[in-house]
Amino acid sequence: MAATQISLMDEPERLRVALTPIRRQLLARLREPASAVQLAAELGRPRQRVGYHLKVLEQEGLIELVEERRRRGCVERVMRATAKAFLVDPDVLAAPGQVDADFTRIADRHAAEHLVEVAAGTVREVTRMAAEADRQGVRLLTFTLEADVRFAEPGDVHRFTDELAEAVSRLAARYDTAGGRPYRLTAGGHPAPRKERGE
């Protein structure tokens, strides 16, 4: 079975295990299968030390065995990362219960903190569903819409948001079907980052 495209790092211990410099190097390199002998040669480190880090990564489910090869009377284990990319769940870095407590107080759809929390929730949910779809050998059907808008003044942002909300409500009502597969639509906007000179 192929590695999943994205894996969500939502457990503090898994994140702690993955964050040391050598383990980050190993995870990046193991997007393609390799053995401890190969990795030690490439990184210029002792094979036993590399083997130790591989064992820790395997115990946390961050890498997996692809095959075993017989070489000179011993077995060489070929490993690979269990995902092409790892994303950190923002909740992992917060105090327990703190994120929920903070964001339940934010009801303003124009608050940057609210946009960040909604975006983080989207990352969390879609990453988990995409990984499960990968395991089942199916494709997760999603869609993404992006647009750039240049607003003349701050009040235009509020008027645009109100009109967009009305348009989305009308369209959602037209397509909403009892017993259908529920989808969550998230729309957000933020100022485009300023480009550095020369970009």
Image (tube, rainbow, N blue to C red):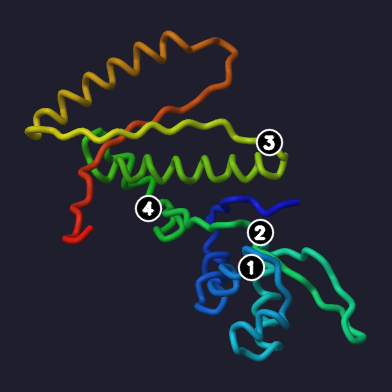
Give the SS element for disc 4.
helix
70 or 188: which is nearer to us?
Answer: 70
Give the SS element for disc 1.
loop
Residue picked out by circle 2: 82
**How far separated are the C-alphas under marks 2 and 1?**
9 Å
Residue picked out by circle 4: 98
Residue 143 lies, in percent from the top left, at 47, 31
Q: Which is more N-terminal, label 1 or label 2?
A: 1
Residue count near mark 1 (Cα–Cα under 10 Å), binned few <14, some 14–19, many ≥20: many
Residue picked out by circle 3: 138
Callout 4 amino acid: Gln
Assign the C terminus to one quadrant of the image. Answer: bottom left
Callout 1 amino acid: Leu
Which of the labelled discs sits on residue 30, or is there none?
A: 1
Q: Which is more N-terminal, label 1 or label 3?
A: 1
63 or 74: which is nearer to us?
Answer: 74
**How far separated are the C-alphas under marks 3 and 1?**
24 Å
Q: Which is more N-terminal, label 1 or label 4?
A: 1
Residue count near mark 2 (Cα–Cα under 10 Å), binned few <14, some 14–19, many ≥20: many
Q: Which is more N-terminal, label 3 or label 2?
A: 2
Give the SS element for disc 2.
loop
Q: Residue at x 66, y 91 (%)?
A: 46
